[in-house]
Image (cartoon, rainbow, N blue to C red):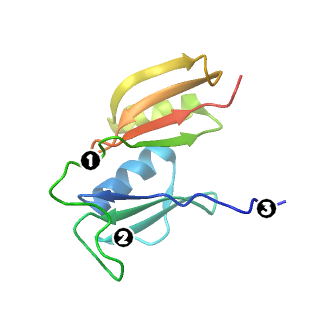
Amino acid sequence: MKPSVRPQPMIAVSDVEKSSTWYCAVLGAASAHGGPEYERLVVDGTLILQLHKVDVGHHHGTIGDPSLPLGNGVAVWFEVDALEEGAARARAFGATVQTDVHHNPNANHDELWLRDPDGYLVVLAGLEK
């Protein structure tokens, strides 16, 4: 049965195209929109993340306050089927590693903690062991 709630997170970024390139490279995602103000990223046809330029309001107002630092206090968390492949993609792209692959005993899985171009904490979490 299809879940009745599906996450579609949106984060404010300083450069949508740069962030799109970063997330596509690290997550193996694909662009489903493209452009300098808004992006939809998909994996296997499923929306996993939306990126929105921080100072563009469109029809709803701005997503974040452009005078404040981006990424503070937010962890963008992705469960991945193949953590080692994700780690290899991140390293090959030159992503900033905050905490290398390690075991999280609370969740009983391995994780890799990265920082995206705007300082968001991005966690790639393997499957539960």
Residue located farthest toward the right when viewing the structure as drawn? 1
- Is 129 placed above or below 28 here? above
Displayed quadrant of residue 96: top left
Q: Position of residue 61 (x, y in %)?
A: 30, 75
Other residues around mark 1 within 10 Å, as few (<14) / some (14–19) / many (≥20): some
Sequence-wise, the earlier of marks 3 and 2 is: 3
Q: Residue at x 39, y 31 (%)?
A: 91
Sequence-wise, the earlier of marks 1 and 3 is: 3
Q: Residue at x 34, y 40 (%)?
A: 73
Q: How far apart are labels 1 and 2 at the CA level?
A: 15 Å
Which residue position holds label 2?
A: 38
Displayed quadrant of residue 50: bottom left
Q: Are marks 3 and 2 in contact (CB under 8 Å)?
A: no
Q: Which mark is residue 118?
A: 1
**115 displayed left or right of 76:** left
Residue located farthest toward the bottom when viewing the structure as drawn? 59
Q: Position of residue 126 (x, y in %)?
A: 61, 31
Q: Residue at x 64, y 60 (%)?
A: 6
- Is 70 placed above or below 38 here? above
Q: Secondary structure at mark 2?
A: strand
Residue type highlighted by circle 1: Asp
Other residues around mark 2 within 10 Å, as few (<14) / some (14–19) / many (≥20): many
Which residue position holds label 3?
A: 2
Residue type highlighted by circle 3: Lys
Q: How far apart are labels 1 and 3 at the CA level?
A: 33 Å
**121 displayed left or right of 107:** left
Q: Position of residue 20 (x, y in %)?
A: 37, 57
- Is 11 placed above or below 126 here? below
Residue type highlighted by circle 2: Tyr
Q: How far apart are labels 3 and 2 at the CA level?
A: 27 Å
